[in-house]
C-alpha cells in the first residue's frame, strides 16, 4: 500500500508529492493529461518552432516561492531568465511606468510627486521580504509566523482595498501600474485585501524579478517531476480519475483539483457548495514576424507588459466583467513576451507573444478584435507582425484544464473572504470530510499563482496525519 496518492500533476500536486517523498513516504501521482504541468506547460500552439505557454508564462511568485527555493530544481534543468525590466506599463502617449528590479528606478518612473510615496510604501518590507513571504504564504496554521510584527504591519497596509492604498499616489503612472498589479488576480480594485495583492507583486519584482523559464514554463513542471522520480515517486499520465475506486490503495489521497471535482470524485455531495468561481479570461498566443512594435521603449525591454491607459480604464474593465456580466470594450490586458530574453522560444528573428483579457465566467464570445485594438493603441502596426494566432476563451481553457471552471484560471473567485479563507471558512483548509482525503490546489491558501505553496502546506497536513497513524 502506498503512503500517498496525488491526483493532478499541476505545480501544487507535484510539490505536495515531492514534499512527501522527501520525508520518506511512498508517493504516486496520477494525471489525466498526457504530460505533467497543469497550468505550467509549453506547447507548439501556432506554428512549428514557436513554443508557447498555454497559461502561466512569467513567474514572479515561483522564483520567490519558499517551497521551490528549498528544492534543487536547477539540477533538473530549470533556469530562470530575466528581461532588462520585469514589467512595463505603457501609456498611449509613448511614456511608461515601470516595475524595475530597484525601488529607485521604479519610483523615478512615477514622477517626482509619487516617487517618495512609493518608496515609503515598499522599502520597509523589502529587507524582510523572504521572511514575510514565508509567513503569509504558509498561513493558516501550517507554521508560526517568524516575524509577526512585520506580518502585522503588512496586513495593516494590505488588507484595506487597493483604492484606499492608491490614495497615497497623486499622478496616473503610479495609480495605473498599481491597479494593473491588483488586476492580475481578476479582483475588483475596491475589494478586501486587494492592496496586499499589489504589494506582493511589487515586492516580488524588487526581490528577485519576474522571470521566464528557459525553454518554456514546462521546464518547471518537468524539473519537479524529475526530482520526484529521483526520490522514488512515480508519475502516471493519461490516467483520468472519476472516483476514488480508480486509484490504488493508499493511506492518504491528495487532490490538486477544483473543489467541485473533488466533491464529485470523493462523493462529498454539497460540501463545497458555497465555493464561488470567478471571471474567466480570453487568451491569445501569437507567432510574430518580429518583436512587438511598442511605442514606449521601456515596453520593448520588459518581460511582462500591462495594458491599461489609466487606473479608471482598468477599474472600468474589471467592473464590466465582475459586476455587469459583459466583456469590456477596452479590456485590461496582461501580456508576456518570453522571446525578448529566451531565443529558444521561436525561430531566429521571430517571436512568441501572449496576451489575455478578463471576460465573464463561462463567456462564449470572441475577444480577439477588442484585444488587438487595445494592442494597436500602444503598439501601432502590431497586426502586421502576426504570423499566426491561437485563441482560447473560457470553454477552451476549461477543456484544457479541468481546474479552470468557466475559464477561471484562479480556480476560484479571489474576492471577499474567499481571498483568504478558501475553499471553506475554516482554519484547516487542506482537510476534507474524509480524514484520509486532502485538497492542495489553488483553491486553498495562499491561492492562485505558480508557487507550489498550496501543495507544500497541504503536504504538512498529510504527513502529520501519516505520522499519527
Image (cartoon, rainbow, N blue to C red):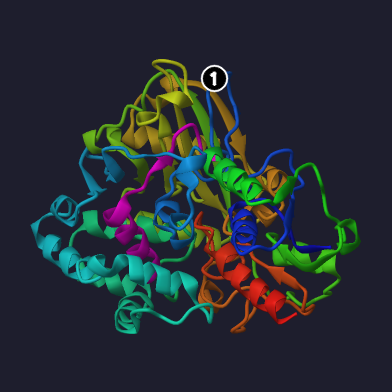
> Where in the figure is residue 440, as x and y percent of width and height?
64, 65
User: Which residue is at 79% across, 77% downward?
Assistant: 434
Judged from this view, the residue extending furthest toward the right is: 245
Q: Which residues are magenta?
A: 196-217
Q: Is residue 120 above or below residue 342?
A: below
**The C terminus lies in quadrant:** bottom right
Which residue does the numbered mark 1 point to in the structure image? 49
Q: Quadrant of residue 200?
A: bottom left
- Would you say residue 195 sits in the magenta stretch? no
- Furthest toward the left, the residue is 112
Q: Residue at x 21, y 71 (%)?
A: 124
Say whether residue 22 is left or right of residue 261.
left
SS type, badge 1: loop
Please state the horizontal and vertical placement of residue 369, each as a whole percent of the image: 51, 35
Image point 72% across, 59% down: which residue? 26
Q: Closest to the observer: 58 or 255?
A: 255
For the N terminus, the image quarter is bottom right
Q: From where the camera sits, is residue 176 visible?
A: no
Q: Nearer the viewer, residue 411 or 144?
A: 144
Image location of residue 229, percent across then percent down: 65, 46
Q: Is residue 167 visible?
A: yes
Q: Residues within 10 Å of mark 1 (few under 14, many from 20)?
A: some
Horizontal relation, residue 299 to residue 399: left or right: left
Q: Nearer the viewer, residue 354 or 151?
A: 151
Amino acid at each position: 500500500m502506498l503512503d500517498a496518492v496525488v491526483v493532478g500533476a499541476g505545480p501544487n500536486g507535484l510539490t505536495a508529492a515531492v514534499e512527501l517523498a522527501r520525508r520518506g513516504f511512498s508517493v504516486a501521482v496520477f494525471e489525466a493529461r498526457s504530460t505533467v504541468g497543469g497550468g505550467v506547460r509549453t506547447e507548439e500552439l501556432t506554428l512549428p518552432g514557436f513554443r508557447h505557454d498555454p497559461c502561466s508564462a512569467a513567474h514572479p511568485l515561483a522564483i520567490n516561492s519558499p517551497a521551490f527555493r528549498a528544492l534543487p530544481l536547477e539540477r533538473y534543468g530549470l533556469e530562470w531568465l530575466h528581461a532588462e525590466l520585469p514589467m512595463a506599463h505603457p501609456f498611449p502617449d509613448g511614456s511608461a511606468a515601470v516595475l524595475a528590479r530597484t525601488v529607485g528606478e521604479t519610483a523615478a518612473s512615477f514622477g517626482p510627486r509619487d516617487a517618495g510615496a512609493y518608496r515609503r510604501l515598499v522599502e520597509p518590507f523589502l529587507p524582510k521580504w523572504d521572511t514575510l513571504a514565508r509567513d503569509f504564504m504558509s498561513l493558516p496554521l501550517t507554521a508560526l509566523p517568524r516575524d509577526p510584527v512585520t506580518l502585522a504591519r503588512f496586513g495593516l497596509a494590505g488588507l484595506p482595498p487597493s483604492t484606499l492604498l492608491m490614495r497615497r499616489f497623486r499622478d496616473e503612472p503610479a495609480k495605473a501600474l498599481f491597479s494593473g498589479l491588483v488586476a492580475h488576480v481578476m479582483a475588483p480594485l475596491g475589494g478586501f485585501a486587494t492592496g496586499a495583492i499589489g504589494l506582493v507583486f511589487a515586492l516580488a519584482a524588487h526581490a528577485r524579478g519576474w522571470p521566464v523559464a528557459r525553454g518554456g514554463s514546462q521546464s518547471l513542471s518537468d524539473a519537479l517531476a524529475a526530482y520526484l522520480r529521483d526520490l522514488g515517486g512515480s508519475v502516471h499520465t493519461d490516467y483520468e480519475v472519476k472516483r476514488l475506486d480508480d486509484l490504488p490503495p493508499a493511506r492518504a489521497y491528495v487532490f490538486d483539483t477544483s473543489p467541485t471535482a473533488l466533491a464529485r470524485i470523493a462523493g462529498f455531495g454539497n460540501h463545497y457548495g458555497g465555493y464561488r468561481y470567478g471571471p474567466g479570461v480570453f487568451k491569445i498566443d501569437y507567432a510574430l514576424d518580429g518583436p512587438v512594435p511598442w511605442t514606449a521603449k521601456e515596453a520593448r525591454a520588459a518581460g511582462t507588459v500591462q495594458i491599461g491607459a489609466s487606473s479608471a480604464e482598468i477599474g472600468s474593465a474589471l467592473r464590466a466583467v465582475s459586476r455587469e456580466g459583459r466583456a469590456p470594450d477596452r479590456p485590461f490586458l496582461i501580456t508576456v513576451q518570453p522571446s525578448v530574453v529566451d531565443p529558444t522560444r521561436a525561430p531566429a528573428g521571430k517571436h512568441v507573444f501572449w496576451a489575455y483579457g478578463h471576460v465573464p465566467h463561462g463567456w462564449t464570445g470572441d475577444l480577439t478584435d477588442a484585444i488587438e485594438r487595445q494592442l494597436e493603441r500602444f503598439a501601432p502596426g502590431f497586426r502586421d507582425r502576426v504570423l499566426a494566432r491561437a485563441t482560447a476563451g473560457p470553454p477552451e481553457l476549461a477543456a484544457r484544464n479541468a481546474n479552470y471552471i468557466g475559464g477561471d484560471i484562479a480556480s476560484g473567485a479571489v474576492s471577499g473572504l474567499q481571498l483568504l479563507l478558501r475553499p471553506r471558512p475554516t482554519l484547516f483548509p487542506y482537510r476534507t470530510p474524509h480524514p484520509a482525503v486532502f485538497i492542495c490546489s489553488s483553491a486553498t491558501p495562499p491561492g492562485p499563482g505558480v508557487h507550489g505553496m498550496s501543495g507544500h502546506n497541504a503536504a504538512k497536513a498529510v504527513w502529520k496525519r501519516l505520522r499519527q497513524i
